[in-house]
Image (cartoon, rainbow, N blue to C red):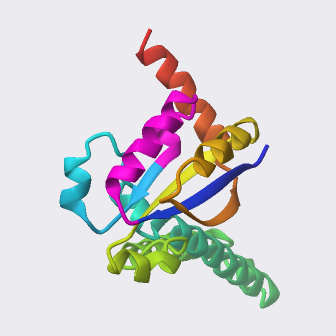
Amino acid sequence: MKTKRYYIISDSLDDLEVFEELLEQSDITTPQIHVLSKDDVGLANHTHLHEVQSLMKLDIVHSVIVGVFTGLVLASLILFFAYQFDLTTTALGWIPFAFLSIIALGFSTWLGGLIGIQKPNYKFIRFESLLSSGKHVIFVDLLPNQISIFNILLSKQPNLQSAGIESTSSHWLILIQRKIGMFRYT
């Protein structure tokens, strides 16, 4: 089951706070809603708004995944060349090449994370100019049964502007957060 992420732009944090309250009253939970803004003081004054977590603003996860795949390719190449050139027939066998491939995988993963810490999230780069001009972006991860409710609520908000939709695979995360929330409040 794929979820959809809806991006909405606004000039006002007050409008976004009202919209978030309406979403929550319509059974769209707080962990599904995130506000991206450069106005940290304004977000702090709107305690009801759910700010994007600082790690989510960075490209760590994406860069680590790229690093893992790069490391897997490097590790495979090391093992392939060791086999092709009969380097594994020595007294040491496969052990040094296995360790070298593990080190290559670990280093590539670490380097990917290090690069990701220094870059903004690749999904949010398109909003940099809007955020710099004082606008705010709210994005909502919706399960398929929530989309019609969301569209109705959005159509009643004249100051909010749609900025795009993308598919995500975070449905399992939303369901887990809902289950944890049920235990927390009972």
User: Which picture quadrant has residue 142?
Assistant: top right
Where the C terminus falls, by quadrant? top left
Q: Is residue 181 above or below residue 79?
A: above
For this view, does 44 lie left or right of residue 14? Answer: left
- Residue 110 sits inside the magenta stretch: no
Q: Is residue 116 above or below residue 31?
A: below
Q: Is residue 12 above or below residue 102?
A: above
Q: Nearer the viewer, residue 171 or 134?
A: 134
For this view, does 120 lie left or right of residue 147? Answer: left
Where the N terminus falls, by quadrant? top right
Q: Nearer the viewer, residue 141 or 82?
A: 141
- Residue 24 sits inside the magenta stretch: yes
User: Which picture quadrant has residue 54?
Assistant: bottom left
Q: Position of residue 55 (x, y in %)?
A: 38, 60
Tell me where the magenta segment starts and ends, as one range: 11-33
Give the residue drawn at x 53%, y 51%.
157
Give the residue drawn at x 63%, y 79%.
70
Q: Position of residue 75 (x, y in %)?
A: 65, 76
Res. 92 visible in picture: no
For this view, does 54 lie left or right of residue 32? Answer: left
For this view, does 25 lie left or right of residue 18? Answer: right
Examine the residues drawn in magenta and state their main secondary structure.
helix
Give the residue drawn at x 65%, y 81%.
74
Res. 73 visible in picture: yes
Q: Nearer the viewer, residue 54 or 96?
A: 54
- Please count the marks in the image: 0
Q: Is residue 62 above or below residue 87?
A: above
Q: Position of residue 17 (x, y in %)?
A: 37, 46
Residue at the farthest bottom position: 85
Q: Position of residue 104 (x, y in %)?
A: 54, 77
